């Protein structure tokens, strides 16, 4: 359901909920928190899309001295992302109430 | 970045190098590197028993290859000016198409025989050669007005086959396919191809020495 590009897909909403309630997280933490709703192979695609939309921002962790491997990315919601989540939650709640009554 | 511990490479180092060849910098840093980083982190944190590490590796590699599989179909607006562009460059799409062709060949071989598989392989190679040629040497034929708006068709009459090596590949490829289907016409078609090549060569030479002659006034080319 996309009207003029204003929509919050389920996975994006889930990520925003985790980030706003649990604070900044790494991609793998989001996957573990979701209990199977987010997959390891696609979570960064979703996060990349959300970053391009301005819903989340990320920062690369500094690699500790002597550390091996690639640095991870820490994700946090932007002000726009938090506003979007609030608006979307209110909208779906109101819609559910309308349908019920 | 992918430093080595006790002289061994961190897992995913080669995958990262391959990814650097096919993915754009933006996708590499926002999608591929974090996926490989998770793999490395999980393997490093896995307890010493081999099975736990093996499981960590399996999860990490599965995530990476899932990403590769979905890559050609993913698009999103980029923060730069590539709004709406497919996030993954053409190379990865080629990789995916190549994998599909190889899979088809593997299926076709046992079912329809090695000969059909070989013909399919040659046909695919011809198509790739023609495509590669036109990418590097866009056709210099004048295109009639309105042609840009037409829908793509699989139709000989709308295929741009110019007087260049692309045209030669097209002709040789077509002749080869017909000869396989109707072997009795091999000499006729070979002679016709040679004769056609000779006429084309003579025409090209004549046009080169008379650049003003033979070109239509309004640059509309008969197809």
Image (tube, coloured by chain):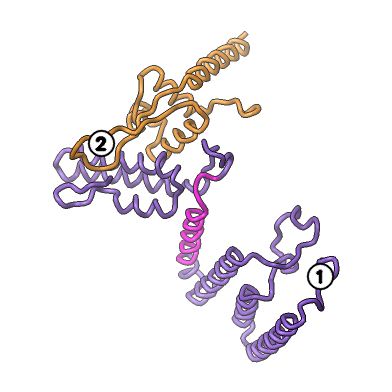
Chain colours: A orange, B purple
Residue occupying the point 58% across, 65% down: B136
Q: Give the chain letter at badge 1.
A: B
Q: Is residue B92 magenta?
A: yes
Task: Give B161 or B185, whichever is nearer the viewer.
Answer: B161
Q: Give the chain letter at badge 2.
A: A
Task: Give B61 or B194, whichever is nearer the viewer.
Answer: B194
**Span colored in magenta:** B86-106
Quote the CA–CA distance across marks 1 and 2: 64 Å
Q: Quadrant of residue A99?
A: top right
Circle 1 sits in a helix, a strand or a loop, which is it? loop
Residue topped by disc 1: B222
Residue occupying the point 19% across, 44% down: B51
Q: Residues within 10 Å of mark 2 (few under 14, many from 20)?
A: few
- Quadrant occupied by the C terminus of chain B: bottom right
Q: Position of residue A15 (x, y in %)?
A: 43, 26
Residue occupying the point 48% across, 67% down: B105
Q: Position of residue B148 (x, y in %)?
A: 74, 55
Q: Position of residue B110 (x, y in %)?
A: 46, 69
The reply to whether residue B181 is in sight is: no
Residue topped by disc 2: A63
Q: Quadrant of residue B222?
A: bottom right
Q: In the drawing, does residue B64 fall left or right of residue A98?
A: left
- Quadrant occupied by the N terminus of chain B: top left
């Amino acid at each position: 359901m996309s009207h003029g590009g204003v929509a919050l897909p389920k996975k994006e909403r889930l990520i925003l909920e985790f980030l706003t309630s649990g604070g900044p997280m790494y991609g793998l933490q989001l996957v573990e928190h979701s209990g199977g709703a987010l997959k390891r192979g696609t979570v960064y695609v979703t996060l990349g899309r959300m970053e391009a939309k301005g819903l989340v921002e990320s920062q690369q962790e500094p690699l500790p001295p002597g550390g091996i491997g690639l640095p991870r990315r820490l994700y946090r919601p932007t002000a726009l992302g938090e506003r979007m989540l609030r608006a979307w939650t209110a909208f779906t709640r109101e819609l559910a109430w309308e349908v019920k009554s | 970045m992918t430093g080595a511990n006790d002289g061994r490479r961190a897992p995913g180092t080669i995958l990262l190098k391959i990814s650097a060849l096919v993915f754009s910098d933006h996708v590499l840093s926002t999608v591929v590197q974090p996926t490989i980083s998770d793999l490395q982190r999980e393997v490093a944190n896995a307890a010493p028993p081999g099975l736990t590490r093996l499981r960590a590796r399996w999860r990490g590699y599965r995530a990476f290859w899932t990403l590769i599989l979905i890559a050609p179909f993913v698009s999103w607006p980029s923060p730069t000016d590539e709004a709406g562009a497919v996030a993954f460059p053409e190379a990865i799409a080629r990789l995916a198409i190549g994998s599909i062709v190889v899979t088809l060949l593997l299926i076709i071989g046992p079912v329809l025989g090695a000969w059909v598989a070989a013909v399919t392989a040659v046909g695919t190679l011809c198509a790739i050669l023609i495509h590669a040629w036109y990418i590097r040497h866009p056709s210099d034929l004048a295109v009639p007005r309105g042609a840009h708006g037409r829908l793509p068709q699989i139709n000989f009459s709308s295929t741009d086959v110019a007087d260049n090596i692309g045209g030669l590949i097209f002709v040789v490829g077509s002749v080869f396919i017909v000869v396989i289907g109707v072997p009795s016409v091999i000499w006729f078609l070979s002679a016709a191809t040679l004769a056609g090549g000779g006429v084309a060569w003579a025409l090209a030479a004549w046009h080169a020495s008379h650049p003003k002659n033979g070109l239509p006034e309004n640059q509309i080319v008969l197809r």
